[in-house]
Amino acid sequence: KELNMKINAPAVMVVGGGDGVGGLRNIAIGIIERLSDAAIEGHHMQIIVVCGKNAALREELMAMKVYQGLSLQILGFVKNMDMWMGAVDVIVTKAGPGTIAEAAIRGLPIMLSGYLPGQEEGNVPLVVNGGYGAFCSKPKDIANTVASWLTDKQLLKRMSENAKRAARPS
């Protein structure tokens, strides 16, 4: 309730770091458009986009028209990321180690949308081979993959279990 989310509608959170940069705009628009189509088909879903300090992007996304079955929250910089991660079913982010670790601990499936060469590159196979996420840099493919995950509860459950296992290696 505190986050103004619907209880029985799957949710994805799209983040772009504190500055809300990278491919965040195109990824967010792609997901909003794809999940609007899913809402028209009867799949009620939620999207949370964290724009960080990027006020122009936040305003642009807030002006988008969405189908009534889609709940959309466009946020600026948030200090309660842990609460948001605990409330969503999937996160779309770059391959930063802190975000991956926190998502894995929460059992949160991850769609990786990019990485910094060298320091984050090795995180991609960790998530993909661990069975709790995927990597894609194309906004349309990201959107389609996330939509398919959100409509498959069994897949989300398996990915969540894999994420929790990865967070506590033996």
Image (tube, rainbow, N blue to C red):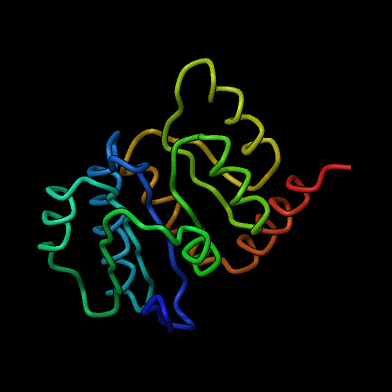
Q: Quadrant of the N terminus?
A: bottom left
Q: Is residue 101 left or right of residue 21?
A: right
In which quadrant of the rendered view does residue 70 lie? bottom left
Q: Is residue 120 above or below residue 112?
A: above
Q: Is residue 115 above or below residue 100?
A: above
Position of residue 108 in the picture relative to residue 58 (left or right): right
Q: How many marks?
A: 0
Residue at the location (37% across, 70% down)? 46
Question: Residue 82 in the image: x percent, y percent?
Answer: 52, 60
Task: State the image coordinates of residue 143 (x, y, percent, origin top left).
Answer: 36, 50
Q: Nearer the viewer, residue 73 or 82?
A: 82
Front position in the image: 150 or 54: 54
- Does residue 139 appear to the left or right of 124 in the view shown? left
At 42% from the left and 37% from the top, the residue drawn is 113
| Residue 79 in which image quadrant | bottom left
Report the residue at 34% width, 43% height from top: 18
Q: Percent position (x, y) of residue 49?
A: 32, 57
Residue 98, image x, y percentages: 56, 40
